[in-house]
Amino acid sequence: MRTRLALAAALVLAALTAAADQEVTHSFSSSVPRGRIRRIVIDIPAGEVRVRNGEAGVIALRGEIRRSYDGWREHEKEQRVVDDVSAEIYVHGDEAVVRRRYGSNARSWSAHSFHSGFDVRLEVPPGIDVILETKYGEVDLDGTFGNVECDLRAGEIRVRTPRANVRDLDASVRVGEVHANLGDQTIAKEGLFPGSMQWINASGKADLHVHSTFGEVHVTLTR
């Protein structure tokens, strides 16, 4: 009897755990002509952000919003919420801003909070400045960019970019790890207050400043 009760309890617990882990999702995509745009500001406070080079004349955005729900009764409501959450590209002069957008079904605090997980993929023309205002999550940049700035409070930053393009590199963490492959040498700093890693190339064009208060920073300069 005790064995059967224990087995039944385990099955119920497993079912509840599986239900709590269920997610609803919503995909989005948009693009704008590059025009006079010289700088991209990514105003996504938390989530996963990946930036790559794309066509010279286009800025293209795509991604997915995810929300967890607990129990089948919540599925329909959470799907309505997530379907009304997305990201858009707003252009003002020579600056484009990637920002969150909420519809009438996503006005609650929960919709605007970290419960709505953003997974953003952005393709930008080579040489454009990229400013990330993301504070929590993962940032991954691979390509040739103009000036790059990223200052996370917690999370991981990965950058892969041509060595010849970088003029001033400053990579740091307050607590965590900094790893840099400069092509001719590899630098690693870890622990509490490991400081910053700086590298200067007088013939380069772009400044690369990346920092995470708590987390990891990985920079690879390619030849």
Image (cartoon, grey):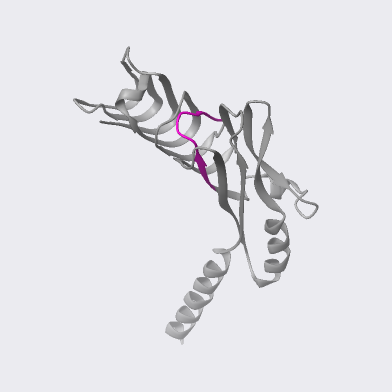
> Percent x, y for residue 65?
60, 53
Name the dominant secondary structure of the magenta segment. strand
Residue reaching furthest to the bottom: 1
Does the magenta-highlighted stretch encompass residue 197?
no
Toward the viewer: 209 or 15? 209
> Percent x, y for residue 16?
56, 70
Does the magenta-highlighted stretch encompass residue 126?
yes
Does residue 54 lie above or below 78 as drawn? above
Residue 140 falls in image quadrant: top left
> Percent x, y for residue 96?
62, 32
Residue 79 falls in image quadrant: bottom right
Does residue 1 lie above or below 106 as drawn? below
Toward the viewer: 109 or 100? 100
Quadrant in the picture for the C terminus:
top left
Does residue 137 lie above or below 35 as drawn? below
Residue 135 falls in image quadrant: top right
Toward the viewer: 10 or 126? 126
Toward the viewer: 103 or 154? 103
Residue depicted at 70% across the width and 50% down the height: 111
Residue reaching furthest to the right: 104
Residue depicted at 67% across the width and 57% down the height: 82
Residue reaching furthest to the left: 184
Residue depicted at 66% across the width and 50% down the height: 86
Left or right of residue 201: residue 186: left
Residue depicted at 40% across the width and 18% down the height: 205
Highlighted range, magenta:
120-132
